[in-house]
Image (cartoon, rainbow, N blue to C red):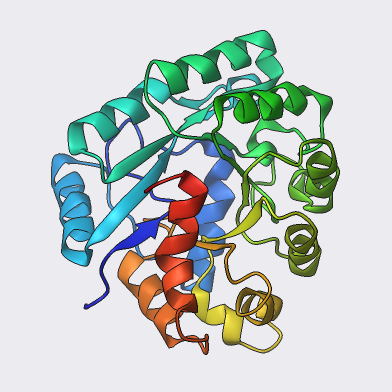
Amino acid sequence: MAVTDFIDFSSVPQTPELAKTAPHLYNYRRVYRDSGDSPTRKPATAETLKEYLAMYERLGARHVVVKAKDIETSFGYRITNEDVAAFCKKHGPRYVGFAGVDPHKGMQAIRDLEHAVKELGLRGLNIQGFENKIDIDDPKMYPLYAKCIELDIPINLHTSVNFSVDTAMDHGQPRKLDKVMVHFPELRVCAAPPGFPWVHELIAVAWRHPNVSIGLVAVRPKYLAVANSGYEGLLQYGNSVLQDRIIFGSSYPALPVDRCIEEIEALPLKDGVKRKWLHDNAARFLGLK
C-alpha cells in the first residue's frame, strides 16, 4: 500500500490494559459482526501488539491517537490516563494520548485532567457521553470545557447513535453540541462518530461553528458514496465548505486501517481534499507542526 504520512485519530493498541472491553458494549460486537464490516478480533497479546506496531510502521502513519476513558460512576470501568501515557512514552512520538475523566466526579475530574496534561503529557480530552450517561450540554460538562480552553487542548466528543442498550441513544445528539459552542466558541471539538442518524444536524453545527471538526471514525468511508446510507451529506459538504474539518479515524480494530484509507482514496473528492482528510485537518486540530 502506497499511502504514507497519515494521522489515525482513533485507534486501540493491542495491550491488555488498553484493549479491554466492558460488558455494556457487548451489543457492538453483534452490530459490527452482522454488518460484516469488522474483522474477527484477536485477544490482546504480545504478538498482536507486535502486529499492531508493525502495521502503523508499514503504512507510514505520522501519528496515531490513543484515548483513555473514565466511566467509573456509570459502569465501574476505566482505561487509565497513566496506561495511555505509558504506552505513548514507550512507543514514541507517533502515538498521541488523550485523557479520559469522569464528569460526575466534579472537581476531581478537573484535577485529573490537569494532571494528565501537565504531568503525563497527554494532548487532549476524550468524553464518550453515552458511556458516562451524560449529555453533551449537561452542566457537569461545562467546567471541563472551560478547562480544555485554559489548557489549550482539544476535546473528542461522541456525537452519534450508540449501540449499547444499557444507556440512552440521545446522549450523542449533535444539536446539544451547538448550545455548547454558543457558550464556548474557543473550544476545539472533534465530533465523532459523524452523527448518524443526525448527520445533517452535525453538518449544520460544524458549518455554524469553525472550531468544530467531524471525525470520520468507526464508519467505513465507502458509505459516504452509497445512496441512502445516511452519510451522503458528509461527502458533499466535506468536499466543499467543510473540507478543512473532516478528520479520519479507523477505530482499529473495529475497522482495518489500510482498507479505510483505500476507501477514502477511492471517494470522488477534489484534488488535495483527500490529503486534508487523512492528515492536514488532524494535524491542525492536534496543534502539530
Q: Residue furthest front?
A: 289
Q: Nearer the viewer, residue 169 or 288?
A: 288
Closer to us: 22 or 142: 142
Mark yes or no: residue 272 visible: yes
Above or below, 266 relative to 52: below
Query: In which quarter of the view is residue 71 placed?
Result: top right
Quarter occupied by the N terminus: bottom left
Residue occupying the point 47% across, 69% down? 276
Left or right of 103? Residue 264 is left
Residue 120: where, in percent of width, then height?
37, 20
Residue 23 in the image: x percent, y percent?
53, 37
Q: Residue at x 27, y 37 (%)?
A: 15
Task: Answer left or right for 286 relative to 86.
Answer: right
Q: Is residue 161 above or below residue 262?
A: above
Where is 18 relative to 58, above or below?
Answer: above
Left or right of 229? Residue 271 is left
In the displayed structure, would residue 12 be above or below residue 213? above
